[in-house]
Image (cartoon, rainbow, N blue to C red):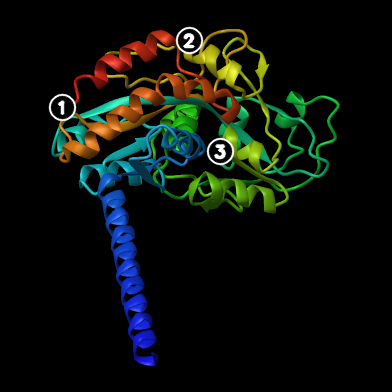
Amino acid sequence: GIGGVAAAVIAFLILNAKRHIAAVGSVALLAAQTNAATVSVTGAGSTFDYPAFSKWFETYRKMDSGVEFNYQSIGSGGGIKNLTTLTVDFGASDAPMTDEAMAAAPGKILHIPVVAGGVAIIYNLPGNPKLKLDGGTLAGIYLGNITKWNDPKIAALNPGVDLPDVAIVPVHRSDGSGTSFIFTDYLSAVNPAWADSVGKGAMVKWPLGIGALAAKGSEGVSGQVKQISGGIGYAELAYADQNKIPYADIKNAAGNFISPAPESVSLALATAKIPDDFRFSMVNAPGDKAYPIAGASWVLVYQHPKNAERGQKLVAFLKWAVTEGQKLSPALDYAPLPVEVQQRELKLLETIK
């Protein structure tokens, strides 16, 4: 009868409601289990490294879905600060930490080189001519002594190039920057006037040249130079290539004009004397084809991480990054680390407990 049909319908609805609740509960449980299984590793620092990290994190996640990386590209100085205050699991810097900074940290910090790259000297001129520059000319530009693109010193390096009567607008980093460290390390190595007056560092007191501008991050420097006619700046090669900004060939220690590229950076890296703590410089390297404005970049980690689980995931990733990850480096405009250096780093990573 009607009562029997109604009872059957009610029973059917109750059964399906139970099934729905059970299914929702299963999904919620699975989500909770998935979230619990995913370890989030945080880092901050170098904009120089950001193109490499982006590709590495994406590739590595396919091999270990139980870890996710959250990296903030805020500049090397910010990375060192955040690591020292224990707000991230790792820092990244293109400038090695000083003895004083390491002593002030709440634990022993290790330097793990992960990339080597060239700092490109980018510029914006009508017609985008290919330029040649040297250390003395670059120092003169950033000291405010060379103010026009048709200056005789630039013209002498570029015979046959129609240089415009346009004001030079030097752009430099406003934040604590490892790219600035590499650039000023190079200028200090090749130009006594620069070494005596400005020196090298992640943050220096920049001379106030005519029209000089400051920008945050390699992205900011690249963006400013791309927008300003007469602009000149420095940025990791990947940013120049990504933004299609011309960059100069730079006179190296052997007297040859060399373009930044993974191959010319590799030749510079091959000459570097790398100590046991991995803090080293490779600017103005000897060699006919070595690019002179090149440097390493480091991941900075505590030898005794405060969180064991995140520390284990980070070490596993770094072991991959300094070996298999190096195979991706040339396509990202970086020079791969030599195998001998990779093996030395693996031994250092084994000391992290």
**Residue type highlighted by circle 3:** Ala
Task: Tell whether 334 sits left or right of 198.
Answer: right
Report which quarter residue 307 is drawn in.
top left
Residue at which label 3 appears: 235
Q: Nearer the viewer, residue 84 or 206?
A: 84
**Residue type highlighted by circle 1:** Lys
Task: Tell whether 131 sits left or right of 122.
Answer: right
Report which quarter residue 154 is drawn in.
top right
Q: Nearer the viewer, residue 185 or 268?
A: 268
Q: Residues within 10 Å of mark 2 (few under 14, many from 20)?
A: some
Mark 2 vs 1, N-terminal side: 2
Residue at which label 1 appears: 353
Name the mark nearer the viewer: 2 or 1: 1
Q: Nearer the viewer, residue 295 or 192?
A: 295
Q: Secondary structure at mark 1?
A: loop
Mark 3 vs 1, N-terminal side: 3
Residue 21 vs 245, above or below: the answer is below
Q: Position of residue 100 (x, y in %)?
A: 20, 33
**Tag on residue 270?**
2
Q: Residue at x 32, y 22 (%)?
A: 279
Q: Secondary structure at mark 3?
A: strand
Mark 2 vs 3, N-terminal side: 3
